[in-house]
Image (cartoon, rainbow, N blue to C red):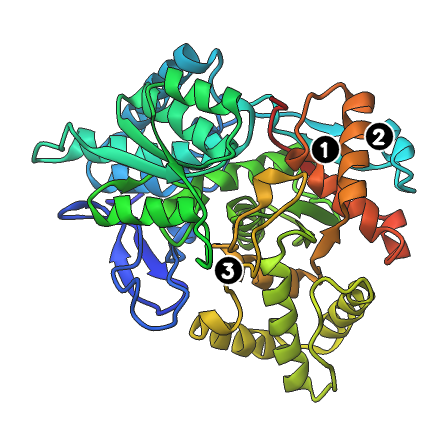
Amino acid sequence: MTTPTMPRLACAGCGTTVDAIGPAGPVWRCPRTGDGDVDHVLRPAGDDAAWPWDADTSSTNPFVRYRTRLTAYRAARALGMRDAAFVALVERLDARVAEVDGAGFGVTPLRIESALSANADLPCGNLMVKVEAEHVSGSHKARHLMGIMLMLDVWRETSATAVDDDLRLAIASCGNAALAAAVVARAAGYALDVFVPTWAGESVVGRLLALGATINACARETGATGDPCYHGFKRAVADGATPFCCQGPDNGLTIDGGETLAWEVLDALDGHPPDAVFVQVGGGALASSIVRGFARAHHAGCAARLPRLHAVQTRGCAPLVRAHDAVTLAVLGRLGVAASALSTLDHHAARERVRRAALIARDTTNADIDAALGHAATHRSAYMRPWDVEPVSLATGILDDETYDWLAIVAGMLRSGGYPVLADEDTLARANRVARDTTGIDVCMTGTSGLAGLMDAMPLAPSLAGERLAVVFSGHRR
């Protein structure tokens, strides 16, 4: 390989490009964030062809196994770090994670759960479950934070000037993301400010305190819109904290680490992805990572095709579904198809979403989709806005007032032929009970909400019965 150059990041909203590590350190978000009604999100600028894509199958640590695909690795090589030195950096940090949490990172199981599909009344014997509920800190969230931390460590080890030892990290979360951040921050030796809702569970708060995090409980103010925890987090970042979070607009590198989950699925299936994946969506980092992970692998020739994406939200909080409905309306308008706006919570809207997805998959060109998405990216508030009332659901982990990574998920659904699903509360409860009883995985209500979405989608789309379907179980029950 020729001398590596610093990887570039491009904003999906405004097109601005920057070096992944600049003179002041890693660049976490678009420098034009806040400029206009634009969805500013940094992502790799598309230089995959310049790097080896093959996985290092000698390692079961995803951050070693897939290192050449990570922005942190590419930045390290551009700054003169040798491959072996980067591997050693990952392994040192992973060893400290294991000291803090009992185990480090590894490839998680992809299980075929025929008994679960039968007990959940799903006529699909080939239901696949990616088990993240027993991973670092009990969920997939640590993948996101590890991707960020590796970039911080690369900067610390290669910087010609001293890195501030008093650097503080910040995150807003009601549970799993905060726990993951606290584990990784403690392992790396950084101070962490966590912004949690007033109703955060005692066990979660107790664990965060034990890990040395500083707790900031945020109350919802009457008449205020948006998540008060996210507002507190944004203030901390404005005051100089590093966004150690699971929101792509605030830290584009959080999606990097999450992509490893999609690549593990592909490796387990020899490059032949499921026909469809049902993914629970709150802030959206998990689904966004899955979309990008599969797309990059497909572009690199390591995935036979793109799986269809179905994002799952609840009736108590569905900002992504509302945004998706608005974008599909715009796409259909470009096709000259008459369609009316949908009421997000209307039960009749579910069948209309299936119909719209079929129309778009059959008749829409990439140019039509790109045009609609381009308008949405530069008119964010017309599509994505905070949920109108205080979010409520049994699946508390996906009650984000906004889906921060919404546009990538909407794009993933449109381009794959998918559509969003609203899970009913009764189905959420049943899915969790059946999942735990059948599989023995002690997963939380949020972690099985993708399965709940599949259960509610099956009667609307009988063709699902003949497909290879996948869900992600993430979040240990506490």
C-alpha separation, residue under disc 2 versus residue under disc 3: 35 Å
Q: What element carries label 1?
A: strand
Q: Where is residue 41 in the image (x, y as percent from the top left)?
A: 39, 58
How crowded is the residue under tag 1: few (<14 C-alpha within 10 Å), some, or many (20+)? many
Residue 60 visible to an observer of this rendering: no
Residue at image position (46%, 18%) is 104
Q: Which residue is drawn at 70% across and 47% down?
A: 277
Image position of 314 with respect to 173: above or below: below
Q: Report if the CB atoms under discs 2 and 1 are less than 8 Å apart.
A: yes
Q: Nearer the viewer, residue 50 or 228?
A: 228
Q: In this view, does 164 lie to the left or right of 12?
A: left
Disc assigned to residue 386: 3
Q: Taking the image as drawn, is residue 430 in sight?
A: yes
Q: Which amino acid does label 2 sit on?
A: Leu
| Quadrant location, the N terminus | top left
In primary-sequence order, the first of circles 2 and 1 is 2
Image mark for residue 366: none
Q: Nearer the viewer, mark 3 or mark 1?
A: 3
- What kind of residue is marked 1? Val
Identify residue type, mark 3.
Pro
Percent across and percent down for residue 172 are 41, 40
Whether residue 278 sits left or right of residue 468 in the image: it is left
Residue for badge 1:
129
Q: Which residue matches tag 2?
A: 116
First along the sequence among labels 3 and 1: 1
